[in-house]
Amino acid sequence: MVNEAIRYLENAKEILKTAPIDDNTYMDIKPVQEACGTAYLAILKAIDEYLIKHGVDTKELPQSVDGYRNMIKKYLSIHNGKLIKEFDKLYKLLHIAGYYRGLLGDTRVVKDAFIATREFIDKINL
């Protein structure tokens, strides 16, 4: 649900506000990890809603990152061939580096990732 996707992204921003900052660096990585995970979920929610709107049964929604890649190729790349690259970039940035590994401490990097997330959601919502 695209509105649901935006809600998740807004929740991610609220979580991020709880992280103390010093010199453009997050001093507590836990809320950053949580925010990045929530922002990544916003992307998945947007894709799910698009797929449902275009006839994919909820039981057939992707269950893995590879499943999402396949669905993007099948249903979304027709409209924008760059979406799979953007999805992969955001997957690595938000899910792997931000959430899983906890590597994103620079406030500018996280802000840019959230902007790219919103742009990705907006492209799907066209």
Image (tube, rainbow, N blue to C red):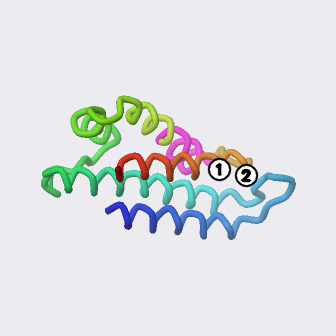
Q: Residue furthest right?
A: 23
Q: Is residue 37 left or right of residue 55?
A: right
Q: Which residue, given by chain and number where applicable, does mark 1 sit on?
A: 110
- In this rendering, the count of numbered labels is 2
In the rendered view, would you say 83 is above or below 61? above
Residue 51 at what x, y percent from top left? 23, 50
Q: In the structure shown, which secondary structural element does the residue marked by tag 2 occupy? A: helix
| Residue range of the region highlighted in magenta in the rendering | 91-102
Residue depicted at x 13% and y 54%: 57
Q: Is residue 29 magenta?
A: no
Q: Do the residues bearing badges 2 and 1 touch, measured as CB atoms within 8 Å?
A: yes
In the rendered view, would you say 15 is above or below 36? below
The label on residue 44 is none
| Image quarter hosting the N terminus | bottom left
Residue depicted at x 69% and y 70%: 18
Type of the residue with mark 2: Thr
Q: Is residue 89 left or right of residue 15?
A: left
Q: Is residue 60 left or right of residue 28?
A: left
Residue 47 at what x, y percent from top left? 32, 50
Residue 45 at what x, y percent from top left? 35, 57
The label on residue 107 is 2
Report which quarter residue 85 is drawn in: top left
How many neighbours does mark 1 have within 10 angstroms: few (below 14), some (14-19), or many (20 or more)? many
Q: Is residue 98 magenta?
A: yes
Type of the residue with mark 1: Val
Residue 72 at what x, y percent from top left? 29, 38
Q: Is residue 123 left or right of residue 60?
A: right
Q: In the structure shown, which secondary structural element does the residue marked by tag 1 occupy? A: helix
How many neighbours does mark 2 have within 10 angstroms: few (below 14), some (14-19), or many (20 or more)? some
